[in-house]
Image: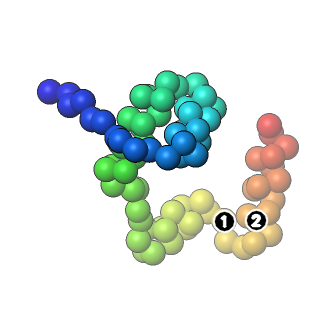
């Protein structure tokens, strides 16, 4: 069952920044606050060093030159 929460005594400067952020994201202030709360309690997608190394190896790139060429090709394709 959803719960109603209330935040009291929010400084004007903080409230103004939240409103700006909500507007930039095309959300209501309520919607923006809900997204912030969800992000705060959702575990980040963290990977360890071994997983990162495997992701790099999976690209098939072996040298910085190959990586540079892949990045340029990606940019040129846009």
Q: Position of residue 7 (x, y in %)?
A: 34, 40
Say left or right for 37 vs 59.
left
The N terminus, quarter of image: top left
Image quadrant containing the C terminus: top right
Q: Mark 2 or mark 1: name the one nearer the start of the chain.
A: 1
Note whether 74 is above or below 16 in the view shown: below
Q: Are marks 2 and 1 in contact (CB under 8 Å)?
A: yes
Instruction: Say which residue appears at 67% left-offset and 71% top-offset.
Output: 62
Above or below residue 71? Residue 76 is: above
> Number of numbered discs present?
2
Residue 11, position in %: x, y? 50, 46
Q: Which residue is mark 1?
A: 61
Residue, disc 2? 66
Q: Is residue 35 left or right of residue 57?
A: left
Please tell me the numbered disc located at residue 76.
none
Image quadrant in which you'd find residue 68: bottom right
Instruction: Give residue 18's position: percent from left, percent from top.
Output: 54, 39
SS under mark 2: helix
Q: Closest to the observer: 64 or 24?
A: 24
Q: Nearer the viewer, residue 27 or 77?
A: 27
For label 1, the SS is loop
Residues packed near mark 1 inside 10 Å, few (<14), some (14 to 19) or many (20 plus): some
Left or right of 13 on screen, residue 7: left
């Amino acid at each position: 069952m959803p719960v109603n929460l209330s935040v009291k005594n929010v400084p004007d400067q903080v409230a103004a920044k939240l409103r700006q952020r909500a507007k930039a994201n095309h959300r209501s202030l309520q919607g923006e606050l809900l997204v912030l709360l969800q992000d705060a309690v959702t575990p980040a997608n963290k990977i360890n060093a071994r997983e990162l190394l495997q992701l790099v190896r999976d690209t098939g790139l072996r040298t910085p030159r190959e990586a540079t060429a892949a990045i340029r090709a990606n940019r040129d394709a846009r």
